[in-house]
Amino acid sequence: MRYILALDQGTTSSRAMLFDHSGAVVALEQAEFTQIFPQPGWVEHDAQEIWQSQLKTAQKCLKKILNKPQDQYLPGSAAPDLVISSTPEILAIGITNQRETTVLWDRQTGQPLANAIVWQDRRTAGRCDELREKGFSDVIRQKTGLVLDAYFSATKLEWLLDNIPGARARADKGELAFGTMDSWLIWNLTGGKAHVTDASNASRTLLFNIHTMQWDDELLALFNIPPSVLPKVVPSSGLVGVSDDSLLGSRLPIAGIAGDQQAATFGQVCLKPGMAKNTYGTGCFMLMNTGTQSVASQHKLLSTVGWQLDVNGKRATTYCLEGSVFMGGATIQWLRDGLQIIDSAAEVQALAESVPDSGDVYLVPAFTGLGTPNWDPYARGAMLGLTRGTTRAHIARAALEAIALQSADVFTAMSQDAGVGLKELRVDGGASANDLLMQMQANFSGVPVVRPKVTQTTALGAAYLAGLAVGFWSGVDDIAGQWQIDRCFEPQISPDLRAAKLARWHKALARAGDWAEE
Ligand code: ADP
C-alpha cells in the first residue's frame, strides 16, 4: 500500500495522519502542546515544542503502519527508541497549519528568538488602531482582502522585530527568518534547506498582495518588515523540498501546503465556484470558493487565497470568501467548564433534546466580541428571555442554536456576496458530529447541510494537495469522486418560521452589542 502523510499543525494540538488512495485515514496520532498566556490578551506557543510534537506524531504514525522485519534503529533520531523501517510507501508529505501564528528564528542556529505569537493574541490591537486612524484600512483591504486587525501576522512580526533586543539589526543583516507554522515545520523537516510558505498562508499575513500574488513593497514598508526575513511563496501543490533522512526514516518529498481552513475547503472538494463549507471547531469558519477571481465582499467577509495549483503547466489561483464565528464549539466548552451544566461536549445534544424548544431563550456568545458580519470587539455575551421556567436544558438548546444562528448570518452574507443562492453547505469539525446542531443549521440557513463520511477534511486537503503533486491522484476529478455523504440534513421549518427566528436572534444580538467599556 502507498500513503500520503498529512501533518495538521493546529492551535491546541499537532496531528499526523496517513491517507490511502481512497482518501481513508489509516493511522492517526495526536499530541497536545502548551498554551502560554503571559499577560491578559497575549497567547504564545513554544515553536520548538510544536516542532517536536509534530515530529513525534509523524514518527508514531509511520511506525504504526510501516513496521517490518527489516526494521532498524535510527541513529540520531529525535526519538532514540524509535524503530522504523525505510519508508518507500510514503509518497509525499502534505502540511496544513494554524494560520497567522508568527515565528521568528535564527537562520544559522535554527533557534526561535522568542515564543511564537498566536493568531488569538491581541497585543498589537493598539498598533492596528493607530494605522486605522492614519487611514490605511482601505489600501490594506484592497491589496490583501483582509481587515486591519491584530489577528493577522504583520503587526505580530513587527512587534517581535521591535521588542527582541537586536532583532531588527540582525534582520537587516539577513540573519533572521520569519514564517507561519508551515514555514517553520518545513524549515525543520528539510534541515534548514527550504524557507517557503504557500500562497494561502501568505495571504493571511497582511503583507501579501492577493492580486499580484507577491509580497507587497508598500505593505512591507508600512509594517516595517525587511524583505530579507520573508519566505519564498510557492504553490499549494508542488515539490518544495525533501525531509532530512534522520527524521522519518527516509527522504520524503514535501509536496503540499495550505492554511487549515483552505485545506479543509479543498478536503471537502469545494472545487467549483459557489461551493461552501463550514468547519465547527473552537470557532466556526465558513469558506466559499469564488473561482479565479477575488471577490471584494460587500458584507464584511474576508477575501483570501484558497489555493494555488499548477494545472497543465499553468499556475492557477482559486480565491475564497471567508467568514468567522469566534465562539462555535467553544460555546459548548463554556457550558461544560464555565456553567458546568454538562460533563462532556457530547452530552449537550441529549440535554437540548430533552426540551422541545429553547423556551424563547437566546444566548449570544459574544464572549470575545463578535466576528463576521458584525465585527464588534466590544460586544459581550448575553442571555435573554429568561423566565422562572428556564432550565439548563433550555440554555443548552439556546447555546446550540446560537452556533447555528451565527453561522446562518455568515451564510446569508456569503449568499449575498455570491449574488446567487448557495445550494448546500458542507460541514466538518468536531461539533459537526452533533445531529441536532446540523438540523438547526439546515433550518436556519434554509439549505441542505451535508456531512461527509471523512470529517478529517483539513488533513485530507493537505494530503490531496501533496498527492496531486506526486501523481498519487491524477487530477482534481480523481479526488472529487472520493467525497461521500454521511448524512444530509434538509431544512424542516417554513421560511416564515425561519424569518421569525432570525429576527428574534438579531434583536438579541443588538442587545449584546457595544457593551464592554475599554
Ligand atoms: P479544534 O480543531 O478547534 O480544536 P475540533 O474540530 O476538535 O476543534 O472540535 C472541538 C470543538 O467541538 C470543541 O469546542 C467542543 O466543545 C465541540 N464539540 C465536540 N463534540 C461536540 C458535540 N457533540 N456537540 C457540540 N459540540 C461539540
Image (spheres, rainbow, N blue to C red):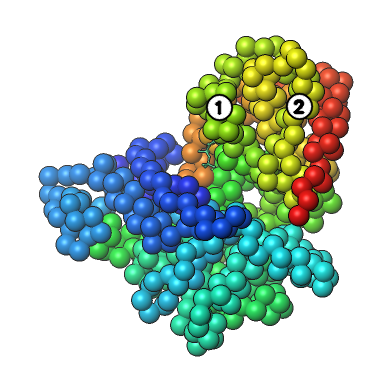
Which type of secondary structure does the marked residue at label 2 adopt? strand
- Disc with the residue nearer the chain's start (1 vs 2): 1
Taking the image in four quarters, ligand 1 sits in the one at: top right
Q: Nearer the viewer, residue 489 or 353?
A: 353
Marker count (numbered): 2
- Dot 1: few (<14), some (14–19), or many (≥20) neighbours within 10 Å? few
Q: Name the element at disc 1.
A: loop
Q: Dot 2, crowdedness within 10 Å: few (<14), some or many (≥20)?
A: many
Out of 298 and 25, give the one closest to the viewer. Answer: 298
- In the image, what residue occupies the spot 58% across and 20% down? 349
In percent of width and height, residue 58 lies at 33, 50
**Type of amino acid at the residue the image marks with label 2:** Tyr
Looking at the image, which is closer to me, 336 or 288? 336
Residue ID for mark 2: 362
Q: Is residue 411 visible?
A: no
Q: Residue at x 71, y 77 (%)?
A: 222
Q: Is residue 168 visible from the viewing direction of this image?
A: yes
Q: Disc 1 to disc 2, how far (Cα)? A: 18 Å
Q: Residue at x 58, y 33 (%)?
A: 338
Residue 233 place in picture, x, y as percent: 55, 69
Q: Which residue is mark 1?
A: 340
